Amino acid sequence: MGLLDGGGGGTSMYLVYKHTDKCFWLGKEDIVEFDKLVVDVDSVKTGWGIFSDDRHQYVWGEKPGILGPKPADIGDDYWRKAFSVECYIKDTEESVLWQSFTVGNCNAFNALTDTYLDRFEEKKPGQVGAFLSLKDDKGRLQVAYKDDKRNTSWPLFEFHSWIDRPEGFVSVIAAAEQNKEDAKPEISEKDIPF
């Protein structure tokens, strides 16, 4: 399967790993530290991502791990392998979307999936994966590097177990869609001009 969008700060629903800081962020402004990450492996999407026209764009494959054809590049911007997965940060009790096409985030996601794939048949319907965020001897994220130049890194995780979905773990995608629906004004007969 081995294969984000950083929203604003504050209450952002987007989780992203940043190589420069060697830490996870919620959106663009808030660092988030955690020891336990719960992952809805049934929500995994893989495909292609691009940042063009001042926005992130994604094209998802029909099944996780199976990429469709790479879309045509847009000017100087090119499509890269991407993933999306809904997560729950156990330490802060926040539901987040981890979605990206950066090398470091994709490698982190690949490494995370490698820790549970051989135990996937143990998963019961509706269960989610519990993962430990590995730390070094100073309590910082334990990371792997692409090569000796250390230009690209990604955090490492250890699979702990399959667990029942925590009560506070909500689908951020479904919640966002519901908020859009709730924001639509109701139209009554008196609003119709004919």
Image (cartoon, rainbow, N blue to C red):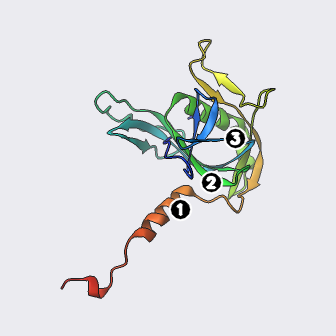
Disc 1 element: helix
Mark 3 and mark 2: Cα distance apart in space: 14 Å
Quick one: label 2, few (<14), some, or many (20+) residues within 10 Å? Answer: many
The tag earlier along the polypeptide, 3 or 2, is 3
Which amino acid type corresponds to the residue marked 1 in the rendered image? Ala
Residue at which label 1 appears: 175
Question: Mark 3 — residue?
Answer: 33
Q: Amino acid at mark 2?
A: Ser
Type of amino acid under label 3: Glu
Q: In x, y percent, where is residue 129?
A: 71, 48
Q: Does residue 109 appear left or right of residue 115 in this picture?
A: left
Q: Mark 2 highlights which residue?
A: 95
For mark 3, does the 10 Å Cα neighbourhood hold few (<14), some (14 to 19), or many (20 or more) residues? some
Q: Residue furthest right?
A: 137
Quadrant of residue 132 within the rendered picture: top right
The residue shown at (55%, 56%) is 172
Q: In whole angstroms, how far apart are the C-alphas of marks 3 and 1?
A: 24 Å
- In the drawing, what numbered circle is on residue 141? none
Q: Which of the two discs, 3 and 2, sits closer to the camera?
A: 3
Indicate the position of residue 149 as horizontal and vertical percent values.
Answer: 59, 12
Give the image location of residue 75, x and y in percent: 28, 30
Residue at x 46%, y 39% (from the top left corner): 47
Is the residue marked by circle 1 packed among few (<14), some (14-19), or many (20+) residues within 10 Å? few
Sequence-first tag of 3 and 1 = 3
Give the x, y percent position of residue 79. 39, 32
Q: Nearer the viewer, mark 3 or mark 1?
A: 3
User: The residue tagged with tag 2: helix, strand or loop?
Assistant: strand
* Residue depicted at x 62% and y 54%: 95
Label 1–label 2 contact, CB within 8 A: yes
Q: Quadrant of the N terminus?
A: top right
